Amino acid sequence: MKPVIRTTPVRRRTAALSAGHACVDVYQGAVAALVPFLVAERAYGYAAASGIVLAASLLSSVVQPLFGMLADRRPMPWLIPLATCAAGLGIALVGLDAGYPATVAAVALSGLGVAAYHPAAARLVRTTVGGTGHTAMSWFALGGNTGFACAPLLVAGALAAPGPAGWCLLALPAALGVLLNRPPARTAAAASPAAGPEKAPATAPEENRPAFLRLCLVVIVRSVVFIGLSTFVALYVRERGGGETAGAVALSALFAGSAGGTLLGGRLAGRWGRVTTVHRAYAAAVPAVAGILFLPLPLVYPCAALAAAALYVPFSLQVTLGQDYLPTRMGTAGGVTLGLTVSVGGLASPLIGAAADAASLRVALVPLAVLPVLAWALARRLPEPVSAAVPGPVPEPDGAA
């Protein structure tokens, strides 16, 4: 009977954080989904439009690890709903069309919210479940990828509304996310010490910094490939004869594949182990990305889904690997694997855009079919750590439902 007592609250918190993650990552997906609109309606070039993506990515790369370090020193669950609000507000402000610098600033505000959210939320997921938490992290990541998948259709529907009403609709996921994230954040705040840094367990495993740095390189390479595809696949489909709807479908297929790959990663890791699953997934990504570029247009959609699935099978596994390589600094590890290394991939977007302006979009995207080979080679050298034990589930405070 004892395990039953805590199962429902733990699952409820995990489900709420997963759904809240979906509401936040809608705004990461929305940035890429806005690129065709900005090119068509505001006459931005490829390089200028990719600079919008860079604004969100670069801010997250600088700030997110800092929030992770703060979460290790002093848990801040109250930051989770506040960051959710900032992520939505920034995207809604893009609709003001006050010029390119103001658009960049609005997207940067959204990126700041995303940066603040992920380390605290990922850490809360791990401590909420206790033990290894791989399955819970997979569900948490699945929530984020579901938000990515919904973003293109949400943006297309919102922008179809006349006037500023559509841009106001883009703030609704943030409002829902605040409602979903507040209960688990409030529970964690009630159970946390009032002040002072957390103390590492006396029996905590030693850190493996070389492995963590190698893992960061793997995540950077993966990020370049996925952000490059998510930024330009809709435009690429349109260049090959598909209309705006076809481009949105291709982007949705890419994001939907990422959601399926995330959930599949947890299951494959249970059979093969995390490291083996990671490097096999990158090997599978090579032909899938090549298919997007060189197969006939009707086959681009399944190839986009397969490429995203292969790139996202390792996603949640890399987060828990990073936490196990740095077992006493889970917030920092989450901030780096979810933020710094992922966002650094956005630095390549302007380079891809400049190459597309100078040559063609297909030529600019060809390196994305080769980079997964590098990720595969790096991942093969990662050690499989003994999963670090983390504190048990956050207890329900007196009177909690």
Image (cartoon, rainbow, N blue to C red):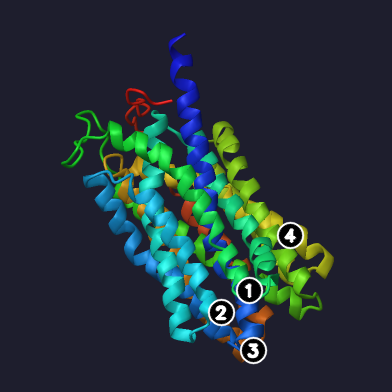
Depth check, mark 1 against mark 3: the one in front is 1
Depth check, mark 1 against mark 4: the one in front is 1
Tell me the SS state at disc 1: helix
The three-letter amino acid code for the residue at tag 3 is Ala
Q: Are marks 2 and 1 in contact (CB under 8 Å)?
A: yes
The residue at 56%/46% (across/down) is: 143
Q: Which badge, 1 or 3, is on the more N-terminal residue?
A: 1
Measured in 3D between alpha carbons, the distance from the residue under mark 2 to the one under mark 1, in whole angstroms, is 9 Å
Measured in 3D between alpha carbons, the distance from the residue under mark 3 to the one under mark 4, in whole angstroms, is 24 Å
Closest to the observer, 359 or 161 = 161
Q: According to the image, label 4 marks what residue?
A: 303
Q: Residues within 10 Å of mark 2 (few under 14, many from 20)?
A: many
Q: According to the image, label 1 marks what residue?
A: 232
Measured in 3D between alpha carbons, the distance from the residue under mark 4 to the one under mark 2, in whole angstroms, is 20 Å
Tell me the SS state at disc 4: helix
Q: According to the image, label 3 marks what residue?
A: 359
Q: Is residue 204 above or below residue 300?
A: above
The three-letter amino acid code for the residue at tag 4 is Cys
Q: Are marks 3 and 2 in contact (CB under 8 Å)?
A: no
